Image (tube, coloured by chain):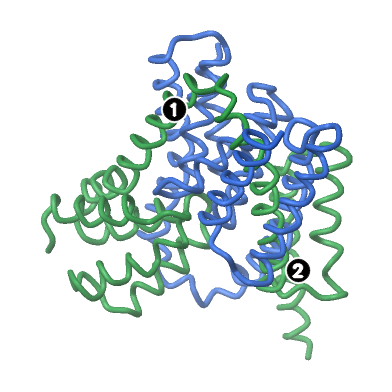
Chain colours: A green, B blue
């Protein structure tokens, strides 16, 4: 059984040395948890990953919660989460306070004038790959299109979209089940 | 009371964050920029940029920075801003962590559950629309400029980054750094 400080340092490393978000952490997590520390086998790791992706929240934090709990119960959860997000929060706060002083600096403003349209592109571009992963087709493309238009044009809260997708998904799977029984 | 509203807003954002960091960004954008008006779309884009080039989960980074800025924009001190950052980061993970604990106690084998698999496939499609809407909502005069030449330069940067990341899977960090350099040269040196 791993010690609490081992859990902390493993997640500290994972949180501190990956730029690019939760999914970018997967290879480092796998290496650290499965290969180096050998806390679990690859299959359990994959299972935990599937659950963490299916549940709401921040993927990396969900992973830390699950691994921490399996290793050391509730204390393990607290230690793993803090390890995972302590450094990122500290770094972001560092940037936030520095940027406040630089706000009116012309060079700073010039740099961000260039970055802003790039950020919008970096949010827009993954949409197409995500659509492919979500198995978009002529039959189901109305779902993302309706979601997009309802939010963009009518200002509907994304919360309603998520809720209806969950309810619709459950009803649809019930319907599929029924059809299977009849066939 | 802005601190309580910040807490409740991020509590809600956490519960509905399905499908990764960009989905969380879309939810934050809607609540914080469109609904509450705590941040301008320009401030929010700057926050997302910073969140993508610093270590850590993008959803947490964005929540932390947004919490800080919302409080400071409301007229409080830097220290109160840091408190806001902690409130946002804590509340965004609170309910998901509790749910995760419940699930890891009772439902460890849910991978095979057909209902969850089908629901996830519908949810994934909806999240695509959610993120597309967030991108569209962030195309504003504040982020792209409202007149030539900034508008045209912005459209150019958008197109290059869009194609580079979609077609050539260019690293987002590199794209942000390069467009920052481009911005510095174009707006700081040439214009």
Is B188 placed above or below A128 here?
Answer: above
Residue matched to label 1: B85
Q: Are marks 2 and 1 in contact (CB under 8 Å)?
A: no
Chain ID, mark 1: B
Q: Position of residue A47 (x, y in %)?
A: 41, 72
Picture residue at 26% right of the left edge, 61% below the top: A70
> Residue reaching furthest bottom?
A183
Q: Quadrant of the C terminus of chain A?
A: bottom right
Q: Residues within 10 Å of mark 1 (few under 14, many from 20)?
A: many
Relative depth, front residue between B16 and B128? B128
**Residue B79 lies in quadrant:** top left
> Residue reaching furthest front?
B190
Relative depth, front residue between A75 and B141? B141
Residue matched to label 2: A172
Picture residue at 51% right of the left edge, 40% below the top: B50
Q: How crowded is mark 2: few (under 14 residues within 10 Å), some or many (20 or more)?
A: some
Q: Position of residue B90 (x, y in %)?
A: 41, 34
**Residue A87 lies in quadrant:** top left
Q: What element carries label 2?
A: helix
Is A32 placed above or below A16 here?
Answer: below
Picture residue at 81% right of the left edge, 61% below the top: A143
Picture residue at 71% right of the left edge, 73% below the top: A132
Left or right? Give the position of B104 relative to A103: left
Q: What element carries label 1?
A: helix
Q: Where is residue B82 in the image (x, y as percent from the top left)?
A: 40, 22
Relative depth, front residue between B92 and B68? B68
């Amino acid at each position: 059984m791993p010690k609490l400080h081992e859990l902390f340092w493993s997640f500290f490393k994972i949180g501190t040395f990956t730029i690019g978000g939760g999914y970018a952490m997967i290879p480092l997590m796998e290496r650290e948890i499965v290969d180096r520390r050998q806390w679990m086998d690859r299959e359990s790791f994959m299972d935990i990953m599937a659950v963490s992706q299916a549940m709401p929240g921040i993927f990396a934090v969900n992973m830390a919660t699950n691994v921490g709990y399996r290793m050391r119960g509730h204390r393990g959860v607290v230690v793993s989460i803090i390890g995972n997000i302590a450094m990122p929060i500290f770094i972001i706060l560092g940037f936030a306070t520095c940027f406040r002083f630089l706000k009116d600096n012309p060079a700073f403003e010039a740099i961000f004038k260039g970055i802003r349209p790039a950020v919008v592109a970096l949010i827009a571009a993954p949409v197409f790959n995500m659509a492919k992963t979500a198995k978009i087709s002529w039959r189901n493309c109305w779902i993302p299109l309706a979601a997009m238009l309802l939010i963009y044009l009518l200002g509907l809260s994304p919360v309603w979209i998520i809720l209806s997708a969950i309810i619709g998904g459950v009803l649809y799977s019930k319907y599929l089940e029924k059809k299977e029984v009849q066939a | 009371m802005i601190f309580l509203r910040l807490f409740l807003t991020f509590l809600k954002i956490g519960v509905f964050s399905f499908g990764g960091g960009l989905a969380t960004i879309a939810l934050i954008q809607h609540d914080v920029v469109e609904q509450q008006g705590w941040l301008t779309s320009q401030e929010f884009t700057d926050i997302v940029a910073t969140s993508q080039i610093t270590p850590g989960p993008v959803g947490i980074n964005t929540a932390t920075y947004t919490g800080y800025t919302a409080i400071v924009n409301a007229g409080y001190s830097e220290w109160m801003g840091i408190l806001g950052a902690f409130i946002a980061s804590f509340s965004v993970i609170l309910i998901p962590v509790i749910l995760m604990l419940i699930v890891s106690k009772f439902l460890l084998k849910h991978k095979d559950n057909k209902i969850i698999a089908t629901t996830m496939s519908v949810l994934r499609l909806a999240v695509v629309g959610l993120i597309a809407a967030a991108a569209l909502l962030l195309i504003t005069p504040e982020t792209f400029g409202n007149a030539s030449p900034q508008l045209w330069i912005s459209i150019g940067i958008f197109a290059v980054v869009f194609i580079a990341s979609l077609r050539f899977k260019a690293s987002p960090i590199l794209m942000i750094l390069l467009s920052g350099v481009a911005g510095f040269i174009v707006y700081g040196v040439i214009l």
